[in-house]
Amino acid sequence: MKRFKTTKGMIGIVLLALIALIAIFGPMVIPPDAATAMDMRARRAPPSLTHLFGTDQLGRDLLFRVILGTRTSLEIAVSAVLMSVVLGLPLGLISGYFGKWIDNVLMRLVDTLLAFPALLLALTISAVLGPNIQNTIIAIGVAFTPYLARIIRGEALRVAQMPYVEAARSSGTTDAMIMWRHVLPNILPAVIVQATISLAFAILAEAGLSFLGLGTQPPAASWGLMIQASRDQLDIAPWTAVVPGLAVALTVLGLNMFGDVLRDILDPRSK
Amino acid sequence: MKDIVSVDHLRVEFATDGGTVVGVEDVSFTIAPGETLCVVGESGSGKSVTSLSLMRLVEFGGGTITAGSLNFERADGSLLDVAAANAQVMGAVRGHEIGMIFQEPMTALNPVFTIERQLTDGLMLHKGLTQAAASARALELLQSVRIPEPERRLKQYPHELSGGMRQRVVIAMAMACDPKLLIADEPTTALDVTIQAEILALINRLKRENGMAVLFITHDMAVVAQMADRVVVMYRGRIVETGSVTQIFENPQEDYTKALLAAVPKLGEMKGKPAPEKMRLIGDEAARAAAAPAKARKPEVLLQVKNLTTRFPVKGGILRRTVAQVHAVEDVSFSLNVGETLALVGESGCGKSSCGRSILRLIEPTSGEVWIGGRDIGALSHADLRRARADMQMVFQDPFASLNPYRRLKDQVAEPILNFGLATGAALDAMVLQLFDRVRLPRDFMNRYPHELSGGQRQRVAIARALAVNPKLIVADEAVSALDVSVQAQVLNLMMELQEDLGLSYLFISHDMAVVERVAHQVGVMYLGRIVEIGPRSAVFDSPQHPYTQSLLSAVPIADPRKRRFGEDLAFKPITSPIFPLGHKPAPSTYTEVTPGHFVLSL
Amino acid sequence: MKRRDFLRSSTALLGSGIFMGTSLPMAAWAEDAPVSGGTLIWGHSETTQNLDMHQTGTASSGRVLQNIHSSIVTVDKDLNVIPGLCESFEVAPDGLSYTFKLRANVKFHNGATMTSADVKYSFERCKDPATGAVNFEVFNNVAAIETPDDLTVIIKMSAINAPFLSRLSENGAGVIMPVDSGPTQGTNPMGAGPFKFVSYEVGTVVKMARHEEYWDGPAFLDAVEAREITEPTTRLTGLRTGELHMINDIPLDRVGELQGDAAVQVKTWFPLNFDFINMNHTYEPFQNSKVRVAFDMIIDKEALMQGALWGQGATTPSPSFPTSAAYNKDLKQRPQDIEGAKAMLADAGYPEGSLNIVFKATTNYPYHIETAQILVEWFKAAGVNLTIEQLTWADWLSQCWVDKDYQMTMMNFFSLWESDFLYYSVWNSEGAFNYRAVKDPIIDELTAKARITVDDAARADVYKQVQQQIWAESHDIILWFRNGTIGAQPAVMGLDTVVHPNGSNLNFHKVWIKA
Amino acid sequence: MTYVLNRLLSVILTLFLITLVTFAVTNILPGDVAMMIMGTQSNPEALAGLRESLGLNDPLLVQYAHWVGGLLTGDWGNSLIFKKPILELLSQKIVASAVLVVMSMGIALALAIPLGVWAAVHRDKWQDTVSSSSALLGVSLPDFFWGIVMILVFARWLGWFPSSGFVDPSVDFLGTLQHAFLPALALGLGLMAHLTRMTRSTMTGILSQEFIRVARAKGLSERTVIWRYALANAIGPVITIAGLQIGYLFGSIIVMESLFGYTGMGWLTYQALLNRDLPLIQDTVFVIAGVVMLTNLAVDLLYVVIDPRIRLG
């Protein structure tokens, strides 16, 4: 069992490491402008030796675009998830730890936010702030916050009832210190695992926003934008969808495999 | 007569994260028809693995029988090697020819099916009964396990039944097809002592009436003494000793058996002794030497509890208003002297834990006063209370849950010291070091995490943490209940030693009468939130006055096969609910002093 | 406001459509005689909104209602105004009175016969501000509508309104509906067109059935179902699977592919609209004509058209319809000269790398996004950093059209070919469509002068000067005329009659399905 | 019963909060309603008059009260783009979306439960990985992508289902189901992953419980133990999680309905948003949020029915 789980985790780690390397070094390695350079004589060219992954409707090389898109997509996903963690953590922690009316008020608020289509939220944010990468991050980050807050709250609620929290309280530890020393470390693994999974959703959310022309603005490349652009040519140029789709799928797969073993890695018990 | 079960050189292996682990090895024993065989051992001894192997249920926990045979004589007289039987045959044997009872009655029943459905599906499967016939048989079964109002129970769901009733249902299920062998895996461990007595008596009766054999798995030597015809003692996956129950208890051959028996407190063995005594530990003569009677102290009151009452609201209705109250602690008064131990005993739900927590104001009492060292705890502000907590510390039941898994032990012991600003830097390290020495933990444990320790070691850390701020009072809430008996003895001895050296006072909350008899100076018996009887240990144990105290003591199994108590059906008065409507004004607790210092609640 | 408003508000005079032919040999149906019967299922590219012909401002509604309504006059293929529901019309020499002789025995869908009272009712309903008619201003100068007899209508004007007749040639203003039918037009549009309205399920389908008593003879089709499928790929799939007989607006990149497919017939025509790139004249760099001209020089229009429209269009330096007398044939688009543009920008005080421009493009027109992406590359070569911001249609309208909050954008206008309406609205500093804040005294003077120039040839010359000035100053960068497209099953016949001369509306009167 | 009333009260409170947020959000959206109505033909006087008649000059609080008052009294206003009473539009479209939502949830559950159970039974074995990986495939690509794949595969190449559109169930119920199937399948694929994961973890927890061992000790077959004993306990939690997905689902149908020309609530909301049809935006968003709330309530109540432990509480 252990060996199996470790292999799975290793695959996840290797996948993610590879993707991270591409994100960090890819843009430095490929020729400048390679991802936006157009070849009008080779529009929608299938994969070949000149264009390993084929080209898109404007004759741009998909290999270069997917490499450049890696950084954009991960940048957006990581920042948005970080933002939702930063917003959701105090919200969920306070709600779950103190309970009672604070919990009631905060969770009613979260429920209300959850009832709204995220798309409306994103559309409003983008209409008010304008479409660009930062605002995409804000839109996704804000939309994810209530989900995260809810999960964190549940975890905090569970931990707050543990005897070691009561033990800490009975030995004179203040609420703030209990949250910092006892609750936070114990919910962190769950939060990190959740954040890992949210990353996958954030990558997809960016694609969803591209459906409305929000998200990354062309000619910059992101996986979401590329998938979005492929939707009108799926039948005649499937590679335009397969290339970014595979990138997302591998990342999602990697994140999930990694997420499963992450909890073990973070747990001192498994050391 | 031929043996109904004959286990021969059983070996079970588990594939775990760390590779293959041997669960049991070279285990051989037999069970004769109509005989009760007790397999006894501490956690990790392999006793449950053995019983599960006999049902071939061990495979569902990741185990594999890799050697040996498990011969079982079937109803038709043929011999079946369970180890080699296929799934179909096992399906026919399980629940039909072998019945099994498990430890946790609260989770042993499927919460979403009615009692009837759970009782009848086995009958319909094995006996081919129609729904109606199965239902009739189910009712019969419930009657035979003496459940009140059996007709109504059939239509109920498990959560509507009390723990004792659920265990009776589980037994009824196991008995449904008149098995020749009943396997009972720690069937009373999770139950209160009076219910335990009832269930043990029930198993005895059913065994007698049906002439079936019983394989009884337990860790509790007292239960073994009460139930067994023959005993198998197991340790770390191997059999240590096998023999008749009197042989094992009166003339144990192996050191392990001897040590195990020594660590078991026997109810009544303290009769006539003035002060608590440490537990006997084989090979620990030093401890025995130190067990000299505690120095007589001048009585000096440390803790004074006056009319303490704690009620929890029961919310209901649209506006979440309080519609009723749980009277968890009701008008409780007592005092505890410096350097002494007051034990609060009682069954689950009697309010003993709430009482301890109310004293520390971990929950807010509704009314009453708590004086510690001349200070009224109830009147303290939030900040003052935090400071006052240096005087009163708590040790919790579950050593697994009361330590934060993500912090080093050093930091957890140091936390109270930091909270009160008692020391920092090198002085802090020195203090922590000293505390580890004090509770006899190796110093290199300081940098470890809780999971690297055993249960007893963790409880020592918890004690060290409680000691860190030099408290005067320690509330020990079932502090040794989760520990194996030998470890329990060690921790109890440590606590008594600390009491002698530091003059600590303990409020010792426990359900285990035998342990309480050993450690307490004073004993308070709680029932439905009130203390029904309180007084010096010898007075309460030797001449219990309150009927509840009497029934409690009569239900405690004694670790002596010659003092069997559970031959006939027992039925104790069930505990009523402590929930009362909002306006309910309970009568104040008034006591009669029967002998000096021995008070009994007036009826 | 919708993009279709441009169409509605701009079709003052006749549009001239040039048919580019179909991929199916003309002979194929020339041999067959039309047969009656069948229901045509049309995959409509847009959602029908308000069904009240007067109130609706959208091309999508107008495209459908074209089959339900008829107007008093109409246009032929060469964009000459010809009689519609009237038998003849006459304009007084002073231009202050119009006399219409109505056709006799024109039947509305409710069976009633059209009279002059219906005409008076329809025009007055349109004129009444309370109706909320999109084209109410057409009747601004109308002083009185007289109905001396059942078949004569005389309209008296208080001032000359040259485009009046042309504006009546479209249903928005010229539609004739039965007296007192106004209140129900929104839910049950009724007129004298070849098809009767049957039902509309919002967003899903409009159903129409043949009007047997249509004045120009009953249609061949029993019924038309306009299914609304806005997603281009889905619509195309519907045509290919045979679920749909016909679709309009084939995605531009697929036209070539479909033309090579024998299983469908493809029809293209131009112009559907013209496109131009806009520079906001209130933005400091664009106040300098050198910058604007330099930007024009950066762009290779033909390559851009091939890139963004997949060749489905024709480049033009002038927005006037090619058939219009006002079209300035002497103009030529500036060829791409990136080095020259660089020099000119440096000369204007914007050396390489100093210009950072945001280009706002609406996702409503995917080819605008493609255009912008191609531009980014050329501008990068010229040392100008162009970044794209995509806007939804509503956002584009509110930011670019209303608030003029943009630096660069692009837009298209449908059938805006009547010269006064085109040049005055779009380039006069007072013009209603002057969202770039163009303020050129020469254009202001010329467009004002054209309004009082009676002679057609002289007037056309004035507009040619306007075009020359727009080009010289590069107020906007005129790109191209875009093609309109239709795809259909081979069995659908009479497709050459389906497109209205305005290039947008579809009329199924003469369409039939081969058995 | 008090439990039900309690939940109802909290739903009413949340609905009130929803009206507040909806109103706030739609009023933050840039753009002028009067401008949207009048279009380019507008002149300042006409605009001012229209603003006045629409009540746009009223203080926000009055506008809010007017809107909420209308909601309560059944006057939901008119759509600016469709020139129809919004209540009428909503009542048509909500049926379409209900069919789609129920169907996609059904498909998701029908796929996720067996897959999740299978994974839980073979926890940490290859079957577990196969299960979670195949479930992940659904979420690895955005749902509109799956929508297009569905159209191409099932409509264009196989020709089994219509590629787009919606048929009124009162006219042709089978047709409704046919039209809803492809978008429902695409949505279901997206929902499946999370549900599979939750089924797996719920089942894993249940399979390690004592009553499962008891059931085995009774001699019940593994099939009965897993698919009756264990699953009966997992259904409640899984349905609760499915209920929480309704919110996500209502977000997804906006894109999916537009893609399939399946004209339900999602499509209507999208049209309203694109055209800045403020009254329609407010009402559709309110209805969607309300439906999401009420579904969660319904799921909670359903849980009460499924799980006897809460029944009396």
Image (cartoon, coloured by chain):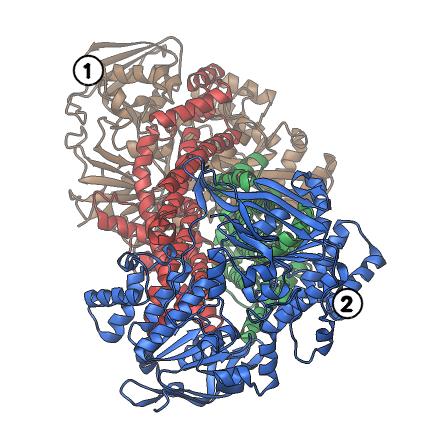
Spot the blue chain and give its letter. Answer: B
Residue A5 image point, x, y percent: 55, 71
Residue A11 image point, x, y percent: 57, 70
- The disc placed on residue B526 is none
Spot the brown chain and give its letter. Answer: C
Q: Which residue is mark 2?
A: B437
- The disc placed on residue C151 is 1
Picture quadrant of residue C263: bottom left
Question: In which quadrant of the rendered image does the N terminus of chain B lie?
Answer: bottom left
Chain D color in figure: red
Toward the right, the furthest residue is B426
Q: Is A162 drawn above or below residue B183 in the view shown?
A: above
Residue D301 image point, x, y percent: 36, 46
Mark 2 → mark 1, Cα distance in angstroms? 118 Å
Tell me the element at label 2.
helix
Tell me the element at label 1.
loop
**In this picture, residue B465 sits left or right of residue C133:** right
Spot the green chain and give its letter. Answer: A
Q: Depth check: B272 or C291 in front?
A: B272
Q: Depth check: B273 or B490 in front?
A: B273
